[in-house]
């Protein structure tokens, strides 16, 4: 299980770096706002495009993995949405609910890729890449819809459609998948330039999460931090495992699918929370707590399915 811990540790250390940098007098609030804009409009889109445009799905049972992934996302999304009336009755506000929803349904595919590469090589990478491909657009659509609907703005269909259509994460994922399916070549120097930006996205995104963190929120987590942590790190993997076994998936692909469902939430949702009126402070607390807990839940999940 050492490889699991060693794959998650750099993420937590980079978040901790963001915590420290935010407290230094070297950087103004405008500096951090600019980094958020850069990540949202340039670096994260580059990361999604370069990952999806050249992913290889020919070595795995793509159909079954696609169905299991989509059913798992649909189930956890529906369950989380069904909790809204109860959570509202307990005093949870709309912006906070969007962060509960985001941190429950999103998953950090790039953390999963790093671990899958060590556990199962090219086969593991192919499984995670396919899971990313079939969920990136639906998950971003769902989460943008939830953010817009609960933001308190005018809830008209046209306004929501415009925000979804203009979302750079959705646009870049769609273009990357289109290039992959149509086998459109990307001029290598252009791809290399985008890949350089993509590599910057992961580290900067984690630093931004740390910069937005209030330490007391993570050290003394409230119920609304623990709830999405339980849903994401315990219930989501169980749902994925159930659907995967129902479809007859076993061995390494099963372990890798459970891994994909067990990783902490994605950091790009924090940027969306800031951009679209969500609760960014709650998001940063949840992603930090999930990352800390994943030191224990990831090895446990893989042990239970025989993947480690």
Image (cartoon, rainbow, N blue to C red):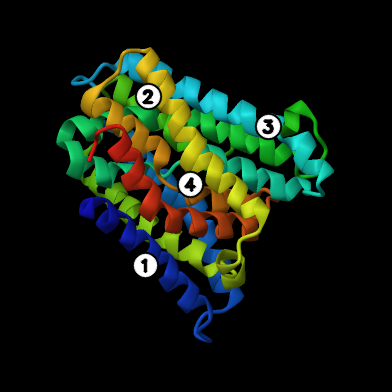
Spatial distance from mark 3 to mark 4, Cα to Cα?
A: 17 Å
Q: SS class of the residue under badge 1?
A: helix
Q: CA distance from mark 2 to mark 1?
A: 35 Å
| Residue neighbourhood size for the residue with mark 3, other residues' Cα within 10 Å, grouped as few (<14), some (14–19), many (≥20) | some
Give 127 or 225, whichever is nearer the viewer: 225
As displayed, is residue 165 above or below residue 97? above
Decide: is 211 above or below 140. below
| Residue at the left extreme, as displayed | 121
Residue extending farthest to the front is 304
Tell me whether circle 3 and circle 4 mark residues in contact (CB < 8 Å).
Answer: no
Percent position (x, y) of residue 66? 38, 19
Looking at the image, tell me whether mark 3 or mark 2 is earlier in sequence order.
3
Percent x, y of residue 63: 33, 13
Closer to the chain start, of discs 2 and 1, is 1
Q: Could you tell me residue 125's position as x and y percent? A: 24, 35
- Residue ID for mark 3: 81
**Is disc 2 in contact with disc 4, using a CB cutoff of under 8 Å?**
no
24 left or right, relative to 297:
right
Disc 1: which residue: 13
Report if the CB atoms under discs 3 and 1 are less than 8 Å apart.
no
Residue at position x 59%, y 52% from top? 226
Residue labelled with disc 2: 178
Q: Is residue 231 above or below residue 134?
A: below
Earlier along the polypeptide chain: callout 2 or callout 4?
Answer: 2
In the rendered image, the quadrant that contains the C terminus is top left
């Amino acid at each position: 299980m050492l490889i699991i811990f060693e794959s998650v540790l750099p993420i937590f250390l980079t978040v901790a770096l963001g915590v420290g940098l935010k407290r230094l007098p070297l950087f103004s609030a405008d500096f951090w706002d600019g980094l958020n804009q850069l990540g949202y409009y340039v670096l994260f889109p580059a990361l999604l495009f370069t990952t999806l445009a050249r992913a290889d799905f020919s070595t795995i049972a793509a159909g079954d993995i696609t169905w299991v992934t989509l059913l798992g996302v649909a189930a956890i999304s529906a369950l989380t949405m069904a909790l809204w009336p109860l959570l509202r009755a307990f005093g949870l506000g709309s912006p906070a609910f969007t962060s509960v929803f985001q941190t429950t349904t999103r998953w950090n595919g790039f953390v999963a890729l790093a671990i899958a590469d060590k556990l199962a090589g090219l086969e593991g990478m192919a499984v995670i890449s396919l899971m990313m491909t079939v969920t990136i657009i639906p998950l971003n659509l769902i989460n943008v819809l939830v953010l817009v609907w609960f933001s308190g703005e005018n809830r008209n269909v046209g306004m929501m459609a415009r925000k979804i259509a203009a979302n750079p994460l959705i646009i870049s994922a769609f273009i990357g998948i289109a290039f992959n399916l149509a086998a459109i070549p990307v001029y290598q120097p252009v791809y290399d330039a985008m890949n350089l930006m993509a590599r910057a996205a992961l580290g900067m995104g984690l630093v931004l999460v740390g910069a937005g963190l209030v330490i007391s929120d993570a050290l003394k987590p409230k119920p609304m931090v623990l709830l999405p942590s339980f849903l994401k790190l315990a219930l989501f993997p169980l749902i994925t495992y159930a659907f995967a076994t129902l479809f007859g998936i076993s061995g390494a692909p099963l372990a890798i699918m459970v891994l994909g469902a067990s990783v902490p939430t994605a950091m790009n949702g924090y940027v969306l929370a800031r951009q679209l009126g969500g609760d960014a402070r709650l998001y940063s607390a949840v992603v930090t707590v999930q990352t800390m807990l994943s030191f224990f839940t990831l090895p446990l999940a893989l042990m239970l399915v025989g993947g480690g």
